[in-house]
Image (spheres, rainbow, N blue to C red):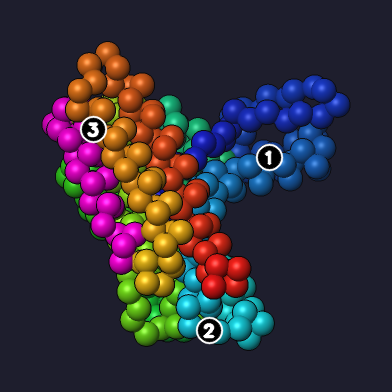
Amino acid sequence: MKCVYSVYYYVFLLVRRGEIMDKVDMTYSELIGNTTISNKQKVTVFLSEVKALIKIGIVNSNLITAITGFLVAIALTNSSFSNHWGSFLLMIIGSAFVIAGGCIINNWYDVDIDPKMSRTKKRPTVTGFFSLRTVLTTGIIVSILGFVILMFTTWYAALFAFIGWIGYVVLYTMWSKRRYTLNTAVGSLSGAMPPLIGWAAVDPSFHVVPFVMFLIMFIWQTPHFLALAMKKKEEYKAAGVPMLPVVRGMGITKRQIAVYIACLLPLPFFLMPALGLTFTIVATILNIAWLVIGFMGLFTKTEKDMKWANLVFIFSLNYLTILFPLMIIVTLPIFN
């Protein structure tokens, strides 16, 4: 369940008493047996490697949308959070495990192409901090634990999590990522599932709100990741990953970004009956602002493409950061 993150693996910085220690080319067993490093530093290094392995940025960003789905469901179904706090904790833990498990297996599978990209060449699977057997076993176990935990909320929550996991691990990582330029759209399925998981943990029946939240996340991911692909075009090319800018060029990529952003325009109006006018206005302003930026790219000169792609990318992060917490805020009693 995808999102943007920065990680440092074997080249890490340990700051203690103003001194920086660089430790490289070390496996987990070598770290444990190293007597020149304090236990506190070993824990710091180990946690850093684990965060990189599970892609902590992806886990956190997906949990935000899952929590939004849960809390909005509580408000719109007139439920009491005090009656669902147990389900809330189980949903968070189970979702985090499923997302982390999928990311771990993604790292295991991509170990052959990750060394070719600067942002992935320090992953613990590449450097050897964790053995590949350990990584695969951990990924499977963590994923299964996540599904089991979610089953204690509702079966539908576990089902949506399973669909998302299959979408990321099988349909994206193992099937489409190295074959088709549509890999971004395929991978978007998994990133759009967390709001459904959160909602289903409260109310498994169909409701338009979680469905529209799913659509927002599904559509949002393509311009977000195409902008990233433009920035990392040469790295994707070197790794043999057929991202749209690599295969079809920058021009069609910019047009696709604008088209996907335009598809977001009508969605807030489907949420207006449930989330109100304030949300609809703010969401529409965000959509129009992003669309303006998107159309700017159609007239941007080649030498300005990277600057424009970075603008699209940064705006996409702010868009998500504002939109989903706003969904929670407008369901508070003060807005009713």
The amino acid marked with disc number 3 is Phe
Indicate which label's residue lies in the foreground, 2 or 1.
Answer: 2
Tell me where residue 291 sits by quadrant: top left
Question: Does the magenta-highlighted stretch encompass residue 257?
Answer: yes
| Mark number, residue 168 | none
Residue denoted by label 3? 295
Describe the element under mark 1 as helix, strand or loop. helix
Q: Where residue 29 appears, x then y in whole percent? A: 65, 44
Q: What is the CA distance from the residue labelled 2 to the residue labelled 1?
A: 45 Å
Residue at left offset 34%, top offset 59% = 268
Q: What is the span of residues highlighted in magenta in the rendered image? A: 247-270
Q: Earlier in the sequence, mark 2 or mark 1?
A: 1
Residue denoted by label 2? 78
Front residue of 259/167: it is 259
Describe the element under mark 2 as helix, strand or loop. loop
Front residue of 131/259: it is 259
Q: Earlier in the sequence, mark 1 or mark 3?
A: 1
Residue denoted by label 1? 45
